[in-house]
Amino acid sequence: MAHPHQQKLKISGSVVITANRLADGVVIHRTSEGQWSENLAGAQILLTADEALAALKAAQADGLIAVGPYVARVEATPTAKPGNLREKIRTEGPTFPLPSDAPVAYLPNEVGKVAA
Amino acid sequence: MYVYDEFDRTFIAERAAQFRDQVARRLSGEVTEDEFKPLRLMNGVYLQLHAYMLRIAIPYGTLSSNQLRKIAEIGRVYDRGYGHFTTRQNIQFNWIKLSDMPDVLVSLAEAGLHAIQTSGNCIRNITTDQWAGVAPDEIEDPRFWAEVLRQWSSLHPEFTFLPRKFKIAITAAPHDRAAIKVHDVGLRLVRNDAGEVGFQVLVGGGLGRSPFIGKLLRDFLPKEHLISYLEAILRTYNAHGRRDNIYKARIKILVHEIGVEKLKADVEKEWERIRDGYLKLDDAFLADIRSRFIYPAYETLEDEPEGLKRALAADARFATWHRNSVAPHKAPGYGIVTVSLKPIGKPPGDATSGQLDALADLADTYSAGEIRVGHEQNLVLPHVRQQDLYALWQKLDAAGLATPNVNLISDSITCPGLDYCSLANARSIPIATAIAERFADHDKARSVGRLHLNISGCINACGHHHVGHIGILGVEKNDREFYQITLGGKADEDARFGDLLGPAIPYEEVVDTIERIVNRYLDLRQSETELFVDTVKRLGVEPFKEALHAVH
Amino acid sequence: MPYIKKGEIADDPYVRLGGDEPVPTDVPVIVPLEWLLAQTPQSLEGRNVPLGVALPNDKPESLLEPYLPRLSLIALDFPIYRDGRAFTQARRLREAYGFTGEIRAEGDVLRDQFLFMVRSGFDAFEVKKDKDAKAFAEALQEFSGFYQPAGAGDAHFRFRFAPPFSPAMKEGESDA
Ligand code: HEM
Ligand code: SF4
């Protein structure tokens, strides 16, 4: 999971522009209308480095909404699905049940299993 | 407990108000993210994968029951009902909104809590022994000195924009429970031949990408010079620490590049200039701080009271826990209870608000209202009467807080890893829980004995993998999670880094490999009293290498 | 760029010189370090208008020592605001060398550093943003007291412990 800040803009396959929302940190993705969506399926899928760079520049100008925008690989099927584990975790949350005071709702044995 | 006075309370409240203004300026666009980031970090606010994270300081690891309840409340009101204790006497919340942060800080301030300098390139929260003040083997309570340093370092005008973070730890016992050798500055309280108390000063330890063991800077520093000497160290570092590359900016790299002798020469030259100036600590100042530490009035009790003996004989589960989790206290008839936050199958170091509330109540009933946080991500009830241990255990057990695995393989130090952390290469928590499950049979784990397993999700080493008896480091290969294993590390007074076992292995193979390593140790050890780490020391990693390869 | 002196926005009397320009003798100037080091301290004796020098943050203050009696200003640089070397330079200039002239912060100078700068011995500021300059007084009032004394710049603040460290709380500062 190459650290996003080390990414050079060499892309292979489909990518989206993704970031966290300034006010609450929630994961957001850039749509084709230049808005931001919490839903990865709503993200604009970009196919070339030029397109991606232009969208990234535009996103960087959106500093009052989006923090730390970067280019993330996705699978286009046909809407965007996470392209690696990092993005999967950003989309779906941690890969184990979160600690909770509610009565145990899972068997401990399943916790360690690979969710990917 | 240290009791905050009006000055302390005002300071924390003003800090919260200042941050409210800074957040407002960020949200309105008056400051950019680049300008804001150092400000939020100095208030413990990170941006993680899913959300903002808030790191709250637990100065020298001491909390009152009311402070613990406040932390539980923050978790319930602003987060998702749980928090994560770190290795540096902090607690982290993972889901707090930036827009809520100012309210959170105000709420914390009401209980004398804050997030000041829990991150950022400044002097971080000073850490110490979680058994400070109650350990039988210490020279004096090191928290007192940690408080002196908290006051000195809080919003220090000159040292708030350092080349990189600066971590200080203090211990007062010969057995180092504060990992001082892997801190930027490690302080050990010692007594000289004349019987005076002073400090041995280590510098340039650290983990991360380039791990170093701290080097001796000064054998004996008279205590009245503590501040002036640290000021000289920090000044030298601020002027000469590298700024061109953040991976080379810690003081350990400066020490490595110019040598400890040169650093010492520079530091002591500056120190000669200032040592007898206005930073020299006087007795009245020290006495004032000392007077704010309140200790419980211990009753005159006998060790091993009858009731305890009967319960130990009658209840095997209690006896197991007692052997594992209770340590000798300096006062006769008392014990130090470690509360494992490593229940099998749960994220290491996490506690729910419900558990924290339960612990706060138990601390009120059984531990003079006091709780400690240690660097192994467990909690401590420091003042428990031995005659109360059985009752306490029953209640801890009911709250899921009596796992008898302290210092066993399932008591791992584990960083948040890829499940939360934006810098991660690989996950840590699911590896930790899977290993704990493999060794869930405490009898088996006990037969293995003391074994520190430390896991980091990337080279930053927040999970202290370098100093684990077994260290696991997440790396990434072609978008897949791989793990490097090291053996033989130690974090105590004989601190050393583990040696690499061999090439990294994929996620799926980690648990089996660890089990094979442990089995290999059971075959190789000379006797049941030879610890894992001692077997590795005796034989090196070579005989363990076959564990990397599954026998098909 | 707004300039703050004595806590207020003011006109900057100094002319800032760059590389090889001739140094005028009739107006206050801030010269580059190289120029200063090329002069002997004696050769500056005849000057009767204020002379300032810009000290880069990777150069030691000790270079200025022979010139200090002739200098009325030292400008210290914050190339990016996270680079805090100039705090140490200012503090050493005040405390180790007893410099009493103007110590000016320039570069990436933002509101949230003002307090630290004043306490480290700065008394003049070239501020990046107008809004920050206007908030100068307010920014200095964010805290009613500090824990640690820091010598030179600290005359205006109250302390938990007055130097030398002692619990001598001033009157009216309740310790209830
Ligand atoms: C989840 C968010 C976290 C982030 C983004 C983070 C980031 C970092 C970074 C960048 C370093 C390396 C610094 C350097 O070497 O210059 C580091 C080191 C460290 N972190 Fe974390 N960390 C996080 C969580 C934690 C947690 C949960 C713990 C405790 C379990 C922790 C304890 C430490 C320690 C002890 C080091 C030691 C290395 C050293 O200072 O030499 N951190 N962290
Ligand atoms: S070690 Fe790496 S993955 Fe783990 S918390 Fe630290 S920065 Fe994140």
Image: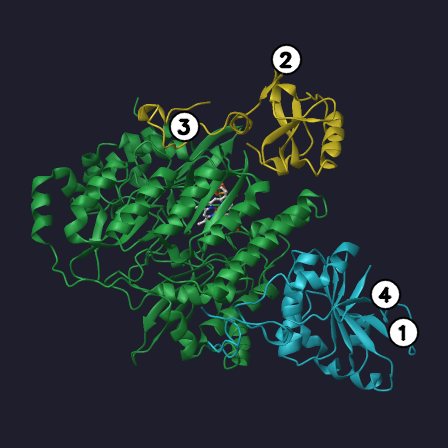
Residues flagged by tags 3 and 1 on a common chain: no
Residue A8 as seen in the image, left or right of residue C167: right
Residue topped by disc 1:
C23
In the picture, measured across the screen, residue B443 lies left or right of residue B306, that is right
Residue B336 place in picture, x, y as percent: 24, 53
Where residue B90 sits in the image (x, y, percent)?
43, 50
Q: Which chain is green?
A: B
Q: To which residue does mark 2 refer?
A: A78
Q: Is mark 4 within 8 Å of ligand 1?
A: no
How many neighbours does mark 2 have within 10 angstroms: few (below 14), some (14-19), or many (20 or more)?
Answer: few
Q: Find the distance from the CA under tag 2 to the CA under tag 4.
A: 60 Å
Q: Are marks 2 and 1 on the same chain?
A: no
Q: Which residue is mark 4?
A: C19
What is the distance, in whole Å, between disc 2 and disc 1 at their CAs? 69 Å
Hey, which quadrant is residue B162 in on the image?
bottom right
> Mark 3 highlights which residue?
A97
Q: Amino acid at mark 1?
A: Val
Q: Residues within 10 Å of mark 1 (few under 14, many from 20)?
A: some
Kindly identify which chain the residue marked by label 1 belongs to. C
Respond whether the residues carrying marks 2 and 4 are from the same subunit.
Answer: no
In the figure, residue B136 lies in which quadrant?
bottom left
> Is label 2's Cβ within 8 Å of ligand 2?
no
Q: Nearer the viewer, residue B29 or B551?
A: B29
Chain letter of disc 3 in the image: A
Residue B448 image point, x, y percent = 22, 40
Chain letter for cyan?
A: C
Which secondary structure lies at badge 3?
loop
Q: Which mark is residue A66?
A: none
